Image (spheres, rainbow, N blue to C red):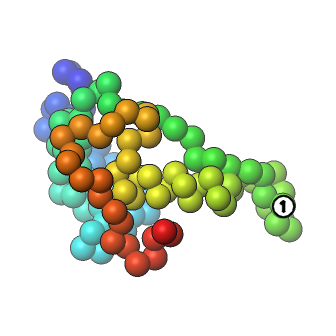
Amino acid sequence: RKGTKLSNPGQLMDLAEAATNALTVDDGPDGIGSVKKLYDLAEDLKKVPTKRITMTTMPNVYSQLQGFQGKVEPKPVDAEKLWSMVRDDIPLDGKPAQNKSVQKVSEDPAAAP
């Protein structure tokens, strides 16, 4: 992580500005639509041990909808399981959560059980 954009405030700000121009993000109070919020997110990400970062692919299927054949879309049941784990901060690597005494349960009323 040393020498990366996350450790250089100027480069991090440039990256955040480029991201806000390239992405469509939620500008609401909980969204990441400002450079400051993206910068703060990157600052928080610096605290995550790299051995606890897990990459995954959204479970997907090829669309059967008229005009969308061949396009990829989330696989309904499996994708919802993944989003539920993300919402509830459940580690995707199967290892127990660190520094957590109680597993968080989503308070999002739109969240699936």
Left or right of 67 in this view: 74: left
User: How many badges with numbers are in the image?
Assistant: 1
The answer to whether residue 51 is visible is: yes
Left or right of 5 in this view: 95: right
User: Residue 70: x and y, percent?
Assistant: 81, 51
> What is the crowding at mark 1: few (fewer than 14 residues within 10 Å), some, or many (at least 20)?
few
Residue found at x 33% / y 37%: 96
- Examine the image and state in which quarter residue 104 appears: bottom left
Residue found at x 44% / y 40%: 92
User: Residue 108: x and y, percent?
Assistant: 37, 73
State the SS at label 1.
loop
The residue indicated by pointer 1 is: 64
Amino acid on which the number 1 mark rests in the picture: Gln
The answer to whether residue 74 is visible is: no
User: Residue 44: x and y, percent?
Assistant: 19, 44
Left or right of 97 in this view: 10: left
Residue found at x 27% / y 48%: 16
Residue in the foreground of this view, choosing between 50 and 10: 50
Q: Where is 113 relative to 41, above or below?
A: below
- Examine the image and state in which quarter residue 14 appears: top left
Residue in the foreground of this view, choosing between 48 and 20: 48
Q: Where is 52 relative to 34, above or below?
A: above
Residue found at x 66% / y 60%: 76
Residue in the foreground of this view, choosing between 90 and 41: 90
Residue lying at the far top in this picture: please name it: 2
Q: Quadrant of the N terminus?
A: top left
User: Residue 61: x and y, percent?
Assistant: 74, 51
- Examine the image and state in which quarter residue 93 appears: top left
Q: Where is 29 relative to 76, above or below?
A: below
Residue in the foreground of this view, choosing between 50 and 17: 50
Residue lying at the far bottom in this picture: please name it: 109
Q: Where is 67 relative to 101, above or below?
A: below
